[in-house]
Amino acid sequence: MMDLFRSQSIRFGTTIHTETIGKLDLSERPFKFWREGEEDGDPETSETIIIATGASARRLQLPGEDTYWQSGISACAVCDGAVPIFRNKPLAVIGGGDSACEEATYLTKYASIVYVLVRRDQLRASKVMAKRLLAHPKVKVLWNTVPLEAKGDGDLLTAIKIKDTKSGQESDLPVNGLFYAIGHEPATSLVRGQLETDADGYIVTVPGTSQTSVKGVFAAGDVQDKKYRQAITSAGSGCIAALECERLLSEEE
């Protein structure tokens, strides 16, 4: 699908440069940018910039995690929860906040049971979210529990090794899916200190727009959205950013 989008873009006259930007200077217009490896050379310039660098799910770097990433391990229940390998199977969610509660509750539509691994003896989630989770008949919360290893048959996840942090006891929990709900890291290192960001590092935009704290700089997708984080919402915000960018350039002609 992305190849089709790219082909359509080129057909309508878009010039695409597949490069990595190593440095940005947003102190004045035109903005300056340097390609990776050329940071000590002369910059290229642009009157407007759209930041769409996304955000990455925090990972635990468990043994076996790389082997079963997207083969049983995921960081998005809404994206992956309905796939066949998870249907009517035991699943696990790691986390104790609102996101973990939301993801676990969502997964009950498909799972036979959902285990929620919480490293403490209580949830960090809001009272409403916690009450809803704990009351669900298909949810079992494992308190004071941390994952140690992802196990499987080489192709798909079949279990996770867990540890009770109070007793120190270790055991294998048979699950066919493991979902991380421990937050995301927005890719904002290029603009940190140059654009307004929130406490979690996400770029702050004017409500209802893609405009950042610097005129001519727009942000789209997960780099400014920590609520929905879906491909379709990112595409929509990208469209908004492109339209606002075009409008600004037209007004300044």
Image: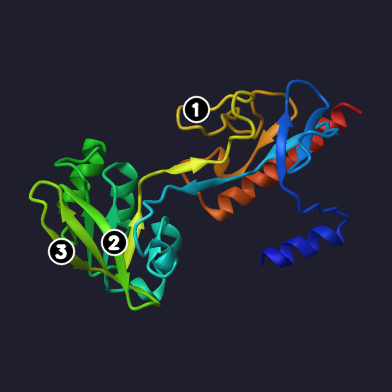
Q: Which residue is mark 2?
A: 149
Judged left or right of residue 110, residue 244 is right
Q: From the top left corner, tell me how far across and down residue 172 is, in percent.
A: 19, 66
Q: CA distance from mark 1 to mark 3?
A: 39 Å
- Give the residue furthest to the right: 253
Q: Which residue is mark 3?
A: 171
Residue at the image point whose x is 26% and y is 44% from the top: 96
Judged left or right of residue 147, residue 225 is right
Which quarter of the picture shows residue 110? bottom left
Toward the viewer: 79 or 35? 35
Sequence order check, earlier mark of 1 and 3: 3
Which quarter of the picture shows residue 140? bottom left
Residue at the image point whose x is 32% and y is 62% from the top: 178
Q: CA distance from mark 3 to mark 2?
A: 10 Å
Residue at the image point whose x is 83% and y is 33% from the top: 43
Quadrant of the snapshot with the C terminus: top right
Q: Amino acid at mark 3?
A: Ser
